[in-house]
Image (spheres, coloured by chain):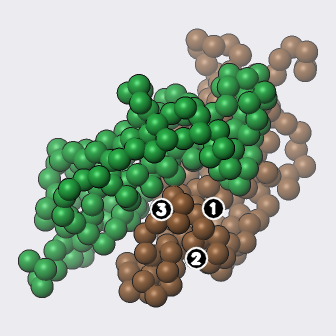
Chain colours: A brown, B green
Amino acid sequence: MNDYKQLYLDDIQVGQKFSSGSHALDATQIKAFASQYDPQPFHLDEQAAANSFFGGLAASGWHTASVTMRLLVDSGIPIAGGLIGAGCEINWPIATRQSDILTVETEVLNVAASRSRPDRGIVTICSNTRNQAGEVLQVMTAKLVVFRRPAAAQ
Amino acid sequence: MNDYKQLYLDDIQVGQKFSSGSHALDATQIKAFASQYDPQPFHLDEQAAANSFFGGLAASGWHTASVTMRLLVDSGIPIAGGLIGAGCEINWPIATRQSDILTVETEVLNVAASRSRPDRGIVTICSNTRNQAGEVLQVMTAKLVVFRRPAAAQ
């Protein structure tokens, strides 16, 4: 968990880094997500997965993304008003496996005040999701809508 | 549902289009996804959402992405061997709401044979997720690993 206060646009600088807590996956979680949102054999069944592209049970990339979001919301980066994404780019260099324990490290890449809306800006972050061996499972570059500190909160 | 056969790399051309079936969201689904993967007030509680950036209950972007994946897997684009994503770019132009009925239209943007691995290639698709009013909720450009037709299947 981060010990930071809630951050407004005014508090965020390029190069700032944040580390999340961790989340341990298992086969039950992988299959539960997949059965609802990505019901493909290599996400649902060990035997079918063994004979697939993945060579063993693999989490849906959307599961990795969703667990990453949970870690970001709980402990990843404390944006005042919440994490509001406008869009993102994601890569999954290697598959997420049932024994993986995920953590997310985030770095601020860019901070841009809005020209049309003086109460807000866009913060670009890069969040790397790693397993316990330090292997990068997901690289996400995301644009967040972040508000300026209101006058009363200064 | 599409009435197509399962497609190998050899069957896919730039400009091909595919339409998915539909999925009707509701507040229960939005809150269930959010409570597990994106527990922020504007995804969990109508009252809190009304006073937020979104002005009303909104689905997590990851929920929109996950429902889009379900539609793609069930009826969106019939790739032989399954939908294996290497990465993607996503934008969420407007929020997904509880009354939205989602469909996904996909177009093939690029087909590239692998130089190092002659059994496969990368197909780039653009999938637009729309609601029943035709509003675009999500634009996703994704790179898929797609295999060539094996000799025995020709």
Q: Residue at x 44, y 39 (%)?
A: B102
Taking B87 as reference, is A149 above or below it? Answer: above
Q: Residues within 10 Å of mark 3 (few under 14, many from 20)?
A: many
Q: Which residue is mark 1?
A: A129
Q: Quadrant of residue B143?
A: bottom left
Chain to which mark 3 belongs? A
Secondary-structure class at tag 1: strand
Which numbered disc, 1 or 3, marks the residue that appears first in the sequence? 3
Nearer to us of marks 3 and 2 is 3
Q: Residue at x 12, y 85 (%)?
A: B152
Q: Which residue is mark 3?
A: A38
The amino acid pointed to by label 2 is Arg
Which numbered disc, 2 or 1, marks the residue that appears first in the sequence? 2
Q: Is residue B13 visible?
A: yes
* Left or right relative to B100: residue A7: right
Taking A1 as reference, is A48 above or below it? Answer: below
Q: Mark number for residue B11? A: none
Q: Mark number for residue A97? A: 2
Q: Is residue A10 visible?
A: no
